[in-house]
Image (cartoon, rainbow, N blue to C red):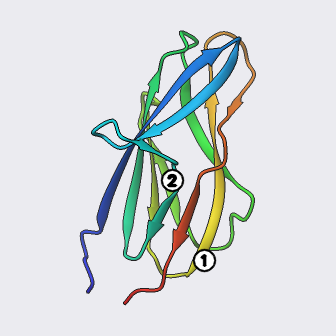
């Protein structure tokens, strides 16, 4: 079944500090815990809404992929305020890819990397 609109998947990404170390927590929009990983079987847009509770002015600046040419994720977009990142998956290639979110902060010029969520593309039925 093909959906030209695609599937919209939303997560919240909350970041807190524990002894100055960023702790990343992924949840569904209803607040239920999630791993951050997602399994796809159709064209999808995966959105992560940043909830920064660090007081450090975190903003999305990108997503880094260890295999950026595997065609699992086809594009990313970031909102102008840096609080929303969207990954576009056309679901044309089966397989999985790991990535890390890259975030800036207002305290210094160093960048923050998230733990490694994954997108897994399953063959369409």
Crowd around label 1: few <14 · some 14–19 · many ≥20 (10 Å)? some
Determine crowd level at label 2: few under 14, some 14-19, many 20+ residues with C-alpha closer than 10 A.
some
Q: CA distance from mark 1 to mark 2?
A: 18 Å
Q: Is residue 84 above or below residue 70?
A: above
Seen from the viewer's position, the closer of residues 34 and 38 is 34
First-in-chain label (1 vs 2): 2
Q: Looking at the picture, does residue 84 appear above or below residue 39? A: above
Q: Residue at x 65, y 23 (%)?
A: 22
Quadrant of the rendering where the C terminus is positioned: bottom left
- 9 horizontally vs 97: left or right: left
- Give the residue at mark 1: 95
Seen at 54% across and 25% down, the residue is 15
| x 58%, y 36%: residue | 61
**Of all residues shown, which one is farthest toward the bottom?**
125
Tell me residue 49's x, y (percent): 40, 36
Q: What is the x, y in percent for residue 30?
A: 27, 39
Residue 21 x/y as whole percent: 70, 20
Q: Is residue 67 left or right of residue 29?
A: right
Query: Quick one: SS at disc 1?
Result: strand
Q: Residue at x 25, y 77 (%)?
A: 3
Judged left or right of residue 97, residue 109 is right
63 versus 75 height, above or below: above
Looking at the rendered structure, which numbered label has been put on residue 32?
Answer: none
Q: Secondary structure at mark 2?
A: strand
Task: Locate the N terminus by quadrant.
Answer: bottom left
Q: Which residue is mark 2?
A: 76
Q: In the picture, residue 16 is in which quadrant?
A: top right
Q: Is residue 51 above or below residue 43?
A: above
Do the residues bearing badges 1 and 2 touch, measured as CB atoms within 8 Å?
no
> At which x and y percent is residue 119?
54, 63
């Amino acid at each position: 079944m093909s959906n030209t609109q695609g599937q919209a998947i939303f997560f919240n990404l909350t970041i807190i500090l524990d002894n100055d170390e960023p702790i990343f927590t992924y949840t569904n929009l209803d607040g239920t815990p999630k791993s951050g990983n997602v399994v796809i079987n159709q064209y999808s847009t995966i959105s992560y809404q940043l909830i920064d509770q660090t007081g450090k002015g975190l903003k999305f600046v990108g997503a880094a992929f260890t295999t950026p040419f595997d065609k699992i994720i086809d594009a990313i977009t970031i909102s102008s305020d840096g609080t929303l990142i969207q990954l576009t998956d056309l679901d044309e290639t089966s397989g999985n890819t790991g990535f890390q979110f890259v975030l800036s902060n207002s305290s210094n010029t160093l960048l923050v990397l998230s733990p490694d969520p994954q997108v897994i593309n399953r063959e369409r039925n």
